[in-house]
């Protein structure tokens, strides 16, 4: 994409913000070098990576990278079998520390394997042994630990003893009365890495030792006392031994790191990529940006878009769309009204989206893929100082007309300005026409009325305006598509105090056609505002309806949960009663067998006792059910009136009849906040006066109903997190239960992820004989994250 458009639309400022969110120098460079992609696969991959990083940041916080240095030169030295320095090992340690932190970060999420960036985390390799050894041996950039080796520890202990002896000897000399007259000062100094004392020049021959230096005045001589010469020599020898031992330790560390050099390089590349991806996520959160939807039909639909470089507290979101009903948009309106910002918003958000960045607009905003974006915005930086304003613009326009094609987006600011208005307007219309004939997406701002008329009379070219509030004499920065902008010169002049007779005289100088055109614009603007207000009102009603729907669904879930609980309790009680009956029957049968001779009288007595026990158990079942059930049998349609209280068997809840049964026997019942249509066969009257069913009949039917309850089958199955093998096993059982329960449609929730589970489920559904059809979910159902299954009747 041409550099001029990127500079004009200030994409560099976005890249600077992105680089600031990165931690490593290499990731910052990736951010500064970022350019838009033109291949949809690259774009969608980059967008998905940004979305996944944003999700992880919200759940687990920022990626804990810390400071990681550049390892490229270090890797080259390791490949050449060179011995690394202490600072170079500290760079390796910082890389291994970041690797360890990132691996730990990824382990916090159970579903990270479903993300597009999962392979980055998986491919990172912890080198724990190397990391521990570096930390054990190296204390800082200038110091190796004493216990890095036993030899180094011995050398430093010897040095410490020698230093202590020297200090003792020097302390005696300084404090001795014998040398007090010879000393210039009672201090110890170091000259040529040797401990010395300052002696007055006149006493240098009287003080035994080696002269190492003189003061500038010559009055002081720095002498190493003879008593510590040997100790100083020993320290120098130990220093040499220490240096050799440190070189050996570093060589051993280098040999330990060399076999893993490829892993170190790979870890560096992965961390750089992750740092860059998470920088995009951090920037998206800062801008409150969302993932755009890309299409191949060159359609742009930005919802409540905000220019990312303006103050988020004051910027006015705007809706911008182009490419479906019209391919060119002519924007008019007052100066400082937001026309140029509109152009830059479309251009900059298109560049950001194609670069894999989220855009500051509402969710599900759409962008097209352009191979080139051309912008003649007219910023001072983009104008060649050696040319006039008009000439500079025309040079840009000529270049655009020569190079723009079907897959280009063209942005013109004040098209045709800077010259004679008549000629400028004619040129502007011709330029727009040339681009329109090539079906090139074009946005242009202008003050020319001729362009407004041209857009009104040309199908495929649309007017738009930046709204202006006459009462406050200030722009609202709202874009009104479909309405040409009005100059408002007369209204503004009147508000500012210009005399009415001058304004009226001015109106007389304008042709009647022009005045009628301005009046038409005013009417259009008024009507458009009314439409927008009604549209907003409809959107609010839709939102309220969705909220109410969610509440009803929540209530339904609650009712179903209560029903499940009651069914569970009823089954438990029935099981206990049956177990008791079985136990009693076993005891009676055992007694019958134990009866000597099996005489008919005793056997008949035992049989009678068994029948009585079963009858008693039946009565117990009835009493337990009747204690909570005061509902009659299925009523007739004539016996049900509006306002009656009924019991709905499918929900096991009481409700109020809102509408009596129709000819099909369907009626409307309200249960709590939920209204539902049910059939008369699914209800019972509560405390009905017309109930004539006998107690024995009620007992029999109620007992039968109580014993024939079946478990409720939900209309959806959630398989997210399951493996393909376990998921298909659960799916098989659920489909059988749902089909036997006469459910017409069910929903299988498998999530989006990599799509492997979704593919396996859909392949399996093809083999199920009683499945009529299946499809992916629509908007509001879960989209590609669910599969909706329809059973055969």
Image (cartoon, helix red, strand yellow):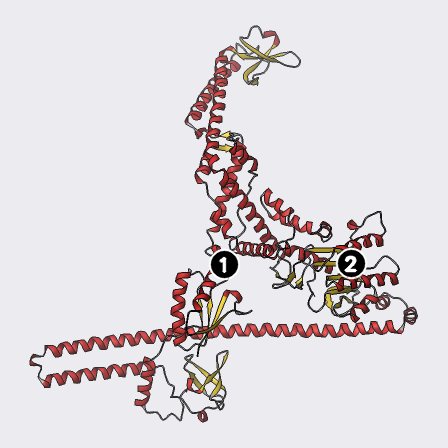
Quarter of the figure with residue 568: bottom left
Is residue 337 something that shows in the picture?
no
Is residue 101 something that shows in the picture?
yes
**440 or 137, which lies in front?**
440
With 234 as the anchor, is 221 left or right in this view?
Answer: right
Counting from the top left corner in percent of width and height, residue 32 is at 65, 46
Q: Residue at x 39, y 62 (%)?
A: 726
Which quarter of the image is occupied by the C terminus?
Answer: bottom left
Counting from the top left corner in percent of width and height, residue 478 is at 72, 65
Residue of label 1: 754
**739 or 464, which lies in front?**
739
Q: Residue at x 77, y 73 (%)?
A: 524
Counting from the top left corner in percent of width and height, residue 298 is at 67, 62
CB within 8 Å, label 1 to label 2? no
Q: Is residue 585 above or below residue 70?
A: below
Q: Which mark is residue 578?
A: none
SS state under label 1:
loop
Q: Is residue 754 above or below residue 469?
A: above
Quarter of the figure with residue 730: bottom left
Disc 1 versus disc 2: distance between alpha carbons? Answer: 44 Å
**242 or 249, which lies in front?**
249
Counting from the top left corner in percent of width and height, residue 415 is at 80, 59
Eye-nearest disc, 1 or 2: 1
Q: Residue at x 81, y 69 (%)?
A: 453
Q: Which mark is residue 413?
A: 2
Q: Is residue 375 above or below residue 130?
A: below
């Amino acid at each position: 994409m041409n550099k001029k458009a990127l500079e004009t639309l200030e994409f560099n400022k976005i890249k600077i913000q992105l680089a600031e969110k990165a931690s490593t120098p290499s990731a910052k460079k990736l951010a500064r070098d970022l350019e838009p992609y033109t291949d949809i696969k690259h774009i969608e991959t980059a967008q998905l990576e940004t979305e996944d990083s944003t999700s992880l940041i919200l759940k687990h916080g920022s990626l804990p990278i810390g400071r990681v240095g550049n390892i490229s030169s270090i890797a080259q030295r390791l490949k050449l079998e060179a011995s690394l320095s202490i600072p170079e090992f500290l760079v390796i340690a910082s890389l291994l520390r970041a690797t360890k932190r990132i691996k730990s970060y990824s382990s916090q999420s159970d579903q990270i394997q479903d993300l597009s960036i999962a392979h980055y985390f998986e491919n990172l390799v912890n080198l724990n042994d190397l990391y521990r050894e570096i930390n054990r041996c190296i204390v800082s950039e200038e110091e190796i630990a004493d216990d890095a080796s036993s030899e180094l520890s011995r050398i430093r202990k010897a040095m410490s003893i020698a230093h202590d002896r020297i200090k003792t000897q020097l302390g005696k000399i300084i404090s001795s009365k014998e040398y007090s007259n010879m000393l210039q000062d009672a201090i110890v100094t170091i000259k040529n890495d040797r401990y010395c004392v300052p002696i007055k020049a006149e006493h240098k021959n009287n003080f035994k030792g080696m002269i190492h230096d003189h003061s500038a005045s010559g009055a002081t001589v720095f002498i190493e006392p003879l008593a510590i010469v040997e100790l100083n020599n020993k320290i120098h020898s130990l220093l040499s031994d220490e240096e050799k031992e440190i070189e050996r330790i570093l060589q051993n560390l280098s040999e330990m790191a060399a076999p893993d050099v490829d892993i170190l390089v790979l870890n560096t590349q992965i961390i750089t990529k992750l740092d860059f991806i998470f920088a995009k996520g951090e920037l998206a959160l800062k801008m409150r940006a969302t993932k755009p939807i890309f299409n191949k039909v060159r359609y742009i639909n930005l919802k409540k878009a905000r220019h990312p470089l303006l103050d988020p507290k004051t910027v006015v979101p705007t809706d911008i769309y182009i490419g479906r009903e019209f391919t060119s948009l002519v924007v008019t309106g007052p100066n400082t009204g937001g026309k140029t910002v509109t152009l830059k918003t479309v251009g900059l958000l298109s560049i950001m989206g194609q670069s894999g960045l989220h855009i500051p607009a509402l969710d599900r905003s759409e962008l097209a893929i352009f191979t080139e974006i051309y912008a003649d915005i007219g910023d001072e930086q983009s104008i060649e100082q050696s040319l006039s304003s008009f000439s500079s613009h025309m040079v840009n326009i000529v270049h655009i007309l020569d190079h723009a094609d079907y897959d280009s987006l063209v942005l013109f600011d004040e098209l045709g300005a800077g010259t004679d208005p008549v000629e400028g307007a004619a040129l502007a219309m011709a330029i727009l026409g040339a681009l329109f004939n090539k079906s090139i997406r074009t946005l242009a701002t202008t003050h020319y009325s001729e362009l407004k008329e041209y857009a009104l009379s040309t199908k495929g070219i649309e007017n738009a305006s930046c709204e202006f509030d006459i009462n406050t004499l200030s722009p609202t920065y709202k874009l009104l598509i479909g309405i040409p902008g009005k100059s408002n010169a007369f209204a503004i002049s009147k508000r500012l105090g210009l005399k009415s007779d001058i304004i009226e005289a001015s109106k007389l100088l304008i042709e009647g056609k022009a005045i009628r055109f301005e009046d038409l614009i005013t009417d259009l603007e008024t009507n458009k505002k009314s439409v927008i207000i009604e549209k907003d009102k409809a959107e609010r009603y839709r939102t309220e309806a969705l909220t109410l729907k969610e509440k009803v669904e929540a209530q339904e879930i609650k009712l179903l949960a209560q029903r499940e609980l009651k069914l569970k309790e009823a089954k438990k009680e029935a099981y206990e009663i049956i177990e008791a009956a079985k136990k009693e029957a076993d005891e009676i049968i055992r007694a019958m067998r134990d009866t000597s001779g099996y005489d008919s009288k005793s056997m008949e007595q035992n049989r009678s006792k068994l029948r009585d026990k079963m009858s008693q158990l039946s009565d117990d079942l009835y009493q337990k059910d009747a204690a909570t059930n005061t509902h009659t049998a299925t009523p007739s349609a004539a016996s049900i009136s509006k306002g009656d209280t009924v019991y709905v068997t499918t929900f096991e809840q009481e409700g109020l009849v809102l509408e009596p049964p129709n000819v099909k026997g369907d009626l409307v019942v309200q249960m709590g906040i939920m209204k539902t249509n049910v059939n008369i066969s699914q209800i019972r009257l509560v405390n009905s006066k017309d109930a004539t069913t006998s107690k024995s009949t009620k007992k029999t039917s109620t007992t039968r109903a109580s014993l024939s309850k079946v478990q409720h089958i939900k209309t959806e199955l959630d398989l997210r997190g399951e493996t393909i093998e376990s998921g298909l096993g659960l799916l098989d059982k659920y489909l059988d239960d749902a089909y036997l329960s006469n459910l017409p449609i069910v929903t299988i929730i498998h999530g989006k992820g990599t799509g492997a589970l979704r593919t396996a489920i859909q392949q399996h559904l093809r083999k199920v004989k009683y499945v009529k059809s299946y499809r992916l979910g629509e908007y509001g159902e879960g989209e590609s994250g669910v599969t909706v299954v329809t059973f055969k009747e």
